[in-house]
Image (cartoon, rainbow, N blue to C red):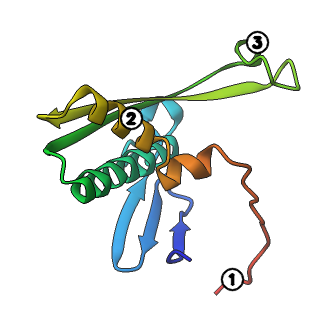
């Protein structure tokens, strides 16, 4: 199980303070969305999680195989489109979330090694979580 993540915000705006163990992060919305752009927005945080774990997964795999992978760069973008783009969607007015992930592999790798690393990227634990059914259980806690 992962460490608890605590997110808190107050009446001063949309900025959120995030604590994970000894780490402190900020999240906010861009000015055009009513925030002050003091940190990444929540979807950018989600993309960062996917991108960083993709990199970690590929790095561990390449090192285990002793492949000459020098650097990995992942660029991610999130968008929403209407479900008409989704053949399997149940509700015609539903939105489809799309994440575009582009991976650059730097190093003297064969075409076969590059293809295998692309396959391994889809086995990244965060990728697997995002593409599975997620059970989020929400309840109220007493104020401190």
Q: In which quarter of the image is residue 80?
A: top right
Of badges 3 and 2, nearer the viewer stands 2
Q: Where is residue 130 in the image (x, y as percent from the top left)?
A: 60, 46
Residue placed furthest toward the top: 84
Q: Position of residue 58 (x, y in %)?
A: 32, 48
Which residue: 53% across, 72% down? 6
Which labelled disc corresponds to residue 143?
Answer: 1
> Taking the image as drawn, is residue 37 in sight?
yes
Which secondary structure lies at badge 1? loop
Mark 2 lies on residue:
118
Q: In which quarter of the image is residue 64?
A: bottom left
In terms of depth relative to the viewer, which is nearer, 26 or 51? Answer: 51
Mark 3 lies on residue:
84
Quarter of the image where the N terminus is located:
bottom right
Q: In this view, does 93 lie above or below 132?
A: above
Quarter of the image where the C terminus is located:
bottom right
Which residue: 56% across, 59% down? 11
Which secondary structure lies at badge 2? helix
Q: Position of residue 74 (x, y in %)?
A: 31, 37
CA gap, disc 2 and disc 1: 46 Å
In terms of depth relative to the viewer, which is nearer, 20 or 33? Answer: 20
Q: Does residue 110 appear to the left or right of 21 in the view shown?
A: left
Of badges 3 and 1, nearer the viewer stands 3
CA gap, disc 3 and disc 2: 28 Å
In terms of depth relative to the viewer, which is nearer, 12 or 50? Answer: 50
Q: Does residue 61 appear to the left or right of 108 in the view shown?
A: right
Q: Does residue 4 appear to the left or right of 23 in the view shown?
A: right
Q: Is residue 136 above or below residue 41?
A: below
Q: Mark 3 vs mark 1: which is more N-terminal?
A: 3
Q: Mark 3 vs mark 2: which is more N-terminal?
A: 3
């Amino acid at each position: 199980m992962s460490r608890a993540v605590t997110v808190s915000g107050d009446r001063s705006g949309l900025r959120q303070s995030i604590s994970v163990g000894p780490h402190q992060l900020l999240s906010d919305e861009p000015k055009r969305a009513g925030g002050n752009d003091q940190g990444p927005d929540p979807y950018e945080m989600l993309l960062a999680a996917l991108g960083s774990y993709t990199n970690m997964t590929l790095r561990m795999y390449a090192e285990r195989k002793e492949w000459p992978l020098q650097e990995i760069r992942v660029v991610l973008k999130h968008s929403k489109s209407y479900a008409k783009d989704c053949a399997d969607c149940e509700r015609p007015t539903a939105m489809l979330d799309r994440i575009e992930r582009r991976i650059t592999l730097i190093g003297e790798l064969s075409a076969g090694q590059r293809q295998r690393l692309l396959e391994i990227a889809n086995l990244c634990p965060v990728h697997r979580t995002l593409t599975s059914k997620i059970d989020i259980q929400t309840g109220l806690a007493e104020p401190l």
